[in-house]
Amino acid sequence: MFTRKLLGGAALAALLLAGSAASGQAKELTSIGATLGSLGNPFFLQIVKGAEKKAKEINGDKVKVTAVSADYDLNKQFTQIDNFIASGVDIILLNAVDPTAIAPAVKRAQDAGIVVMAVDVAAAGADGTVMTDNVMAGAESCQYIVEKLEGEGNVIIVNGPPVSAIVDRVKGCHDVLDKNTGIKVLSDNQNGKGSREGGLEVTSGLLTAFDQVDAIFGINDPTSIGADLAAKQQGRTDLFITSVDGAPDIANQLKDGSSLILASASQDPFTMAERAIEIGYGIMNGKKPDNPIVLLPPELVTRDNVGAYKGWTKE
């Protein structure tokens, strides 16, 4: 399902050695720091694993990967980046809490000779970015809503932290829903914090406020799982939910039919991190990418096609 071709460790090393011939020898990768949205989300754990795998391909067991959870707190992320600078990491994997406000921290790291790779979300000034095409992911998930409702119904969007990935997903969703005059968006500005608990809390309130809800779009799988629980607690089984991530939990629920979630636009966080480290290591050695922004295409996983879904790439 995900057929992106990556350079093998030996091929990558040879390429980088050639690219750094002018300086005599390729720089050695020894340390990576990752500051991510929430390590309570399986998505970000797969980013860590993908980074570890690619790092090992490049320099065996000599690379230390340190991952910390920013918990969507900008000040906390500033501190984490400063700590990475102080410890002298070679690459920072950055899942920016705020894509614009993070710019001074990115510059501090770069001034210290550190390559900053944005992963999953954009970050102003980053040396490169690898993420899902999130506008497409939101559009695919909400097109499923339109088709299932046959163009008429009441929809709730359970929003999340204002990072670029989520903003883009909501934009993609609106691009689709707004073309259908029979679709009414009842709410799109409630922040479920990208978590199961937040999705539960926000959806519980919205379902109390609105008697007739036909479909819900959750901005990621944890949010949608919380929304599913909220609906079931209120006995609201006359609606369905779509999402973004294609996480293992969702794939299992799609297979056994135990959830109101009927579709999720899949991502591949493991591959995302591998690509980011691969590109970052190239930049370390003077090989700038032709395009600093890599968008990985999502694929909609539904109850109908989940049997063919291979899931997230794993080691």
Image (spheres, helix red, strand yellow):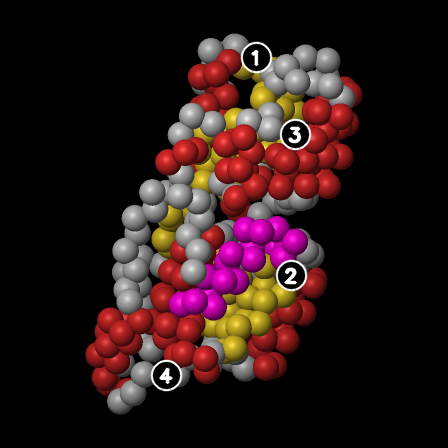
Q: How crowded is mark 4: few (under 14 residues within 10 Å), some or many (20 or more)?
A: some
**Residue 132 image point, x, y percent:** 43, 46
- From the viewer's perspective, tell me whether residue 238 is left or right of residue 91: right
Circle 3 sits on which residue?
Answer: 228
Circle 1 sits on which residue?
Answer: 153
**Segment colored magenta:** 37-54
The local secondary structure at tag 2 comes to strand
Q: Nearer the viewer, mark 2 or mark 3?
A: 3
Q: What is the three-letter code of the residue carrying label 2?
A: Ser
N-term mark: 2 or 3: 2
Circle 4 sits on which residue?
Answer: 27
Circle 2 sits on which residue?
Answer: 69
Judged by its main secondary structure, the magenta piece is: helix
Q: Which residue is drawn at 57% across and 77% down?
A: 85
Q: Nearer the viewer, mark 1 or mark 3?
A: 3
Q: Quadrant where the N terminus lies?
A: top left
Q: Which residue is drawn at 28% across and 67% down?
A: 8
